Image: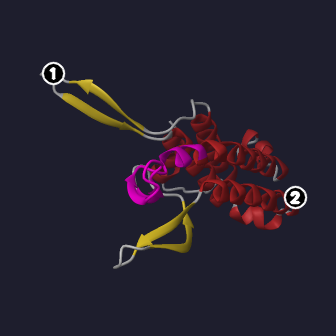
Amino acid sequence: MDDDILMSGFSSGKVEFSKPLVSMLALKDCREKRAVEMKSGYFNETLDKNQVKLKTWIPDSRKTFISSVISFKTLLSPEIKKDKLFKEVWKEIQEKEKEVFDKYAYTKKIIDNNNKIIVTKEKYIPQIDESVILQDPKSKKNVLIKGGWNKHIDNYFYDLIPVYDKLFEELNNLIERMGYYKRISRGG
């Protein structure tokens, strides 16, 4: 339906870009992605008619929501550049996002040719099931552990949800200040 609204102008040869309409659709997309349970991705296992196990990946709804908000922010970048109030709030959001990153980031370690652990300055959020070097609680030795950072990764994305809720709220406030709601109700 939304694509039909956007594409209707193409079939008639008349193409008009309506920033309020596109913004409304992006807002709706973010709202729909946030209106579901925020949970990590997982494999859903079912059996086919021959009792063969099928694994279907169910995407991480938190990442989907975060990506939709980032996309919405990108769409509104010209408006953001002009809005002093948003710029102030954006700094706060970035600080909170950095706090969450610093709390859960893994400091990359590598094993050199002499089997010694070298701690680098690189901090990042590993992928789920990525092998990372951690200290084995039993042997106290540093070992490569597949998925060793998974719990931190999961917590990282849970803690990002309120940050992106705030960003989504502020983007909504921005389009209200821009008068987009009035323009949509009057046709554009």
- The answer to whether mark 2 and mark 1 are in CB contact below 8 A is no
Q: Give left or right: position of 83 versus 30.
A: right
Residue at 81% in and 53% down: 178
Q: Give the mark, 2 or 1, whose residue is nearer the N terminus.
A: 1
Residue at 76% in and 62% down: 80
Q: Residues within 10 Å of mark 1 (few under 14, many from 20)?
A: few
How many marks do you count on the picture? 2
Q: Which mark is residue 85?
A: 2
Q: Is residue 114 above or below residue 95?
A: below
Q: Position of residue 114 (x, y in %)?
A: 35, 78
Q: Give left or right: position of 51 versus 6.
A: left
**Label 1: which secondary element:** loop
* CA distance for labels 2 and 1: 58 Å
Is residue 152 part of the magenta span, yes or no?
A: yes
Q: Position of residue 36 (x, y in %)?
A: 57, 30
Magenta residues (range): 131-155
Q: Which mark is residue 106?
A: none
Residue at 48% in and 41% down: 60
2 or 1: mark nearer the eye: 1
Query: Type of residue at label 2?
Result: Leu
Residue at 73% in and 50% down: 167
Q: Which mark is residue 51?
A: 1
Q: Position of residue 182 (x, y in %)?
A: 80, 43
Q: Residue furthest front?
A: 139
Q: Nearer the viewer, residue 108 or 47?
A: 108
Query: Type of residue at label 1?
Result: Gln
Q: Nearer the viewer, residue 87 or 152?
A: 152
Q: Residue furthest left?
A: 50
Q: Position of residue 179 (x, y in %)?
A: 82, 49
Q: Is residue 83 above or below residue 48?
A: below
Is residue 150 part of the magenta span, yes or no?
A: yes
Q: Residues within 10 Å of mark 2 (few under 14, many from 20)?
A: few
